[in-house]
Image (cartoon, rainbow, N blue to C red):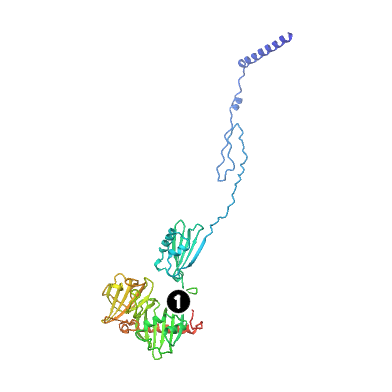
């Protein structure tokens, strides 16, 4: 009981004391000194910001705060999982190739290569964009590269003179012509005639086709059947275009000298490819002659023959030169155009009058130059048309005729064109060309390396 009274007394005494202290603080509080009050109001000045520099900021500035900023640990780089790259496996391709045989068509060859009909049509269309498929012939080669599914990847058609037509099949079809750049090789040779010019050239390792060029050029001055009795000497220079050991195209004569013993005939062909050759007899200019088709093959001569179309025997009133379609055709002598147009089985024709008696006729032409018309004057070697197969013809060729008073005569033996042929205006320049050709022939024959006196320079 006493203890309870004691506790209540202590609590009551504390309350009274606290009340008294509070009242005394209110009623008896002393004034604060002025210096202390001014010091209580002081706050520190803001620190100046550092001058900006180009140095990179290494860490962000922390704003003043009552709460300490949380510093996160630097992020670790995440591991990059690289998948191993597998090599790209190309599908195995199949290659098929062979030469085209006689009587075969492109479609038949492509079918043998395993291509379906729609694909064959696509390939033919691609190749035809760069090559006339009508000119396809035996000896051309075809190679086809296909996928295992039979789709073509690449088709190559190898034609004449090393030319290739390539067609590549992908998202789009691309076709191109690849023509090699041939090397020009100059050759010289000498032959002794015993039986014929053809046999002498063949025995001497010289292209035997030159016999046709010589007969055409000298037909009006030399009778190759009667004047050649044996022992005559023939010396030639020519050039060939080669790719490696393969000859591209036909060789071209540049100089020929036929020594008959009592007479020397020489021919100099120009280097410009115009075909206008100068003929000399015993060192004197005889005439200028232009071949109708440069480098063509004589495919049919003057005289009776079995007609290739009708099958009966009839007179062939001219000579035929086989050449590719579009090959240039030149006037063989100066004259005036007397006819341009179509004429029955001759097809497209150009006829030239050389004086009042002699005319030359050029038939089966595919085209004539724009503007060429009747009455125009032409010189030997002027372009008058292009080889074709118009009229009655089995293939591209030039039918060339010489007519005297309206009657056909052998173009390789008639001498009337020699009288109408254009003479070289400057005999001095012509003789200089002859001297230069002689010197080059002697030099090349002297340094000949081959046993048959042929020389490769």
Name the image quarter holding the N terminus: top right
Q: How many numbered circles does the render carry?
A: 1
Where is 418 relative to 385, above or below?
below
Q: Where is residue 75 in the image (x, y as percent from the top left)?
A: 61, 42
Depth order, front residue of 155/360 = 155
* Residue that label 1 marks: 240
Q: Residue furthest top?
A: 1
Q: Where is residue 330 in the image (x, y as percent from the top left)?
A: 34, 76
Depth order, front residue of 5/46 = 5
Q: Where is residue 432 in the image (x, y as percent from the top left)?
A: 39, 83
Classify residue 149 as left or right of residue 220: right
Q: Residue furthest front?
A: 312
Q: Which residue lies furthest to the bottom in this view?
A: 262
Where is 152 relative to 78, above or below?
below
Q: Is residue 252 visible?
A: yes
Where is 284 relative to 336, above or below?
below
Q: Which SS class for mark 1?
A: strand
Q: Is residue 439 visible?
A: no
Classify residue 153 as left or right of residue 13: left
Q: Position of residue 125 (x, y in %)?
A: 41, 61
């Amino acid at each position: 009981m006493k203890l309870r009274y004691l506790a209540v007394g202590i609590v009551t005494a504390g309350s009274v004391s606290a009340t008294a202290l509070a009242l005394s603080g209110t009623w008896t509080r002393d004034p604060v000194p002025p210096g202390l009050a001014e010091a209580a109001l002081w706050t520190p000045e803001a620190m100046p910001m550092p001058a900006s520099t180009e140095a990179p900021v290494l860490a962000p500035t922390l704003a003043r705060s009552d709460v300490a900023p949380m510093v996160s640990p630097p992020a670790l780089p995440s591991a990059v999982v690289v998948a191993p790259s597998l090599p790209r496996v190309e599908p195995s391709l199949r290659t098929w190739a062979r030469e085209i045989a006689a009587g075969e068509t492109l479609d038949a060859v492509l079918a043998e290569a395993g291509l379906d009909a729609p694909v064959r049509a696509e390939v033919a269309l691609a190749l035809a964009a760069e090559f006339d498929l009508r000119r396809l012939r035996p000896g051309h080669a075809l190679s086809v590269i296909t996928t295992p599914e039979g789709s073509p990847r690449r088709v190559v058609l190898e034609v004449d003179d090393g030319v290739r037509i390539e067609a590549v099949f992908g998202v789009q079809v691309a076709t191109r012509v690849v023509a090699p750049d041939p090397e020009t090789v100059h050759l010289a040779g000498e032959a002794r005639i015993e039986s014929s010019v053809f046999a002498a050239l063949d025995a001497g390792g010289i292209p035997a086709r030159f016999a046709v060029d010589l007969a055409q050029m000298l037909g009006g001055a030399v009778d190759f059947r009667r004047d050649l009795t044996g022992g005559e000497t023939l010396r030639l220079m020519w050039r060939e275009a080669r790719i490696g050991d393969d000859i591209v195209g036909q060789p071209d004569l540049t100089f020929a000298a036929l020594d008959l013993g009592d007479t020397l005939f020489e021919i100099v062909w120009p280097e410009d490819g115009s075909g206008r050759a100068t003929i000399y007899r015993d060192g004197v200019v005889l005439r200028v002659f232009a071949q109708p088709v440069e480098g063509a093959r004589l495919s049919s001569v003057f005289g009776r023959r079995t007609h290739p179309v009708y099958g009966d025997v009839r007179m062939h009133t001219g000579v035929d030169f086989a050449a590719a379609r579009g090959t240039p055709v030149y006037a063989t002598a100066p004259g005036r155009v007397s006819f341009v147009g179509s004429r029955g089985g001759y097809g497209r024709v150009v006829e030239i009058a050389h004086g009042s008696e002699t005319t030359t006729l050029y038939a089966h032409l595919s085209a004539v130059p724009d503007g060429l018309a009747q009455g125009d004057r032409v010189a030997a070697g002027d372009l008058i048309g292009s080889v074709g197969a118009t009229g009655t013809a089995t293939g591209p060729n030039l039918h060339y005729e010489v007519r005297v008073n309206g009657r056909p005569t052998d173009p390789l033996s008639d001498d009337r064109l020699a009288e109408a042929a254009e003479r070289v205006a400057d005999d001095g320049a012509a003789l200089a060309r002859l001297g230069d050709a002689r010197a080059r022939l002697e030099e090349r024959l002297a340094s000949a390396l081959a046993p048959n006196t042929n020389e490769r320079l």
